Amino acid sequence: MLRKAIFPVGGLGTRFLPATKALPKEMLPVVDKPLIQYAVEEAAAVGIEEFIFVTGRNKTAIEDHFDHSTELESVLQAKGKMEALDLVRAMVKNPGAVSYVRQQAAAGLGHAVWCARKLAGGEPVAILLADDLILGQPALAEMVAHWPGGNMVAVMEVEAEATGSYGIVTPGEDDGKLVEVKGLVEKPDPKQAPSRLGVVGRYIIEPGVFDQLDKQETGAGGEIQLTDALATRIGAAPFHGLRFSGERFDCGSKLGFLKANIAFGLARADLAEPLRDWLTQLR
Ligand code: G1P
């Protein structure tokens, strides 16, 4: 049973300055929805009941986003804008279902996840990185459907020259969808990379990963890497990669973010036609 999800949202978002000076990067919208809301909805769709945000300074907009806005709600009510009212109310989770914990130092993704260890409470947890936006079938749902227990990561083939941006898998048994993970290394040079199978920001981790993170060992970039903690669990717990079917956009990069806005716009019935018309006229 998977009941909890961790959303590491402590990053500074320097690649999107000046937009992210006062606004958390996870609040950047794709079409009309913030990145973090896509991730939260993906988690809610698989029955996640507890939403754990690992935040940092200047992230209160995320907390406000998932809470009631009494002023807005009363204005919408008074004006009879019931559709908008339903939309904002539907985002608010049950009392106690959302927790926030601060990551007090930018010490890596593994460190961010470790900050949530008490809230994870010895259960398996999902981890979703809001930067990795997936169009089409939600990746976490596919993972849950194929999860044999233990650790699992979403994987996709990446460009040979891009291995230095991803956790890269050493594949074992592989049925084209589910692939056994025999090794995992964080951001290897293309020459040293064991494959081109890269980790995308969706994980299911078993509690043993937290025991490893407790050791606070640093890896690539001097940071505490989730990748390294997962790698040390190979042999102790099952570990699989899942090739997801959707299209992934790297919204941590400007180009990926722009592409996501266009692709998600084209997927919307109210926008597809005028957007396509305009795109075909572009030179
Ligand atoms: C993180 C992980 C990396 C993974 C990537 C997916 O890196 O450390 O293993 O492949 O997310 O987006 P980041 O992109 O935060 O540098």
Image (cartoon, rainbow, N blue to C red):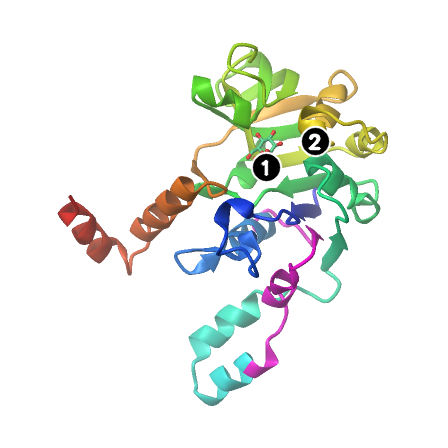
- Can residue 149 be seen here? no
- The relative height of residue 45 versus residue 270 in the rendered view (above or below) is above
Asked if ligand 1 lies within 8 A of label 2, the reply is yes
Left or right of 101: which side holds 155?
left
Q: Which residue is mark 2?
A: 226
Please give left or right for residue 146 compared with residue 17 in the image: right
Residue at 73% x, 38% y is 107
Q: Helix, strand, or loop for circle 2?
A: helix
In this rendering, the answer to whether 264 lies above or below 244 is below
Magenta span contains residue 27: no
- Name which residue type carries label 1: Arg
**Image location (x, y in percent) of residue 198:** 53, 24
Is 47 magenta? The answer is yes
Secondary structure state at the residue bearing disc 1: strand
- Foreground: 230 or 9? 9
In the image, what residue occupies the spot 84% across and 47% down? Answer: 118
- Which residue type does callout 2 highlight? Leu
Crowdedness of circle 2 by 10 Å Cα count: few (<14), some, many (20+)? Answer: many
Looking at the rendering, the stretch of residues picked out in magenta corresponds to 45-71
Circle on res. 35: none
The quadrant the N terminus occupies is: top right
Residue 115: % across, % down: 78, 44
Image location of residue 11, percent across then percent down: 63, 47
Give the labeled residue for mark 1.
202
Residue 188: x %, y % from top left: 58, 18
Q: Using the rendered image of the protein, determine whether residue 265 is visible from the camera's viewpoint.
A: yes
Q: Quadrant of the C terminus?
A: top left
Q: Disc 2, disc 1: CB below 8 Å?
A: no
Q: How far apart are labels 2 and 1 at the CA level?
A: 12 Å
Q: Quadrant of ligand 1?
A: top right
State whether residue 51 is above or below residue 193: below
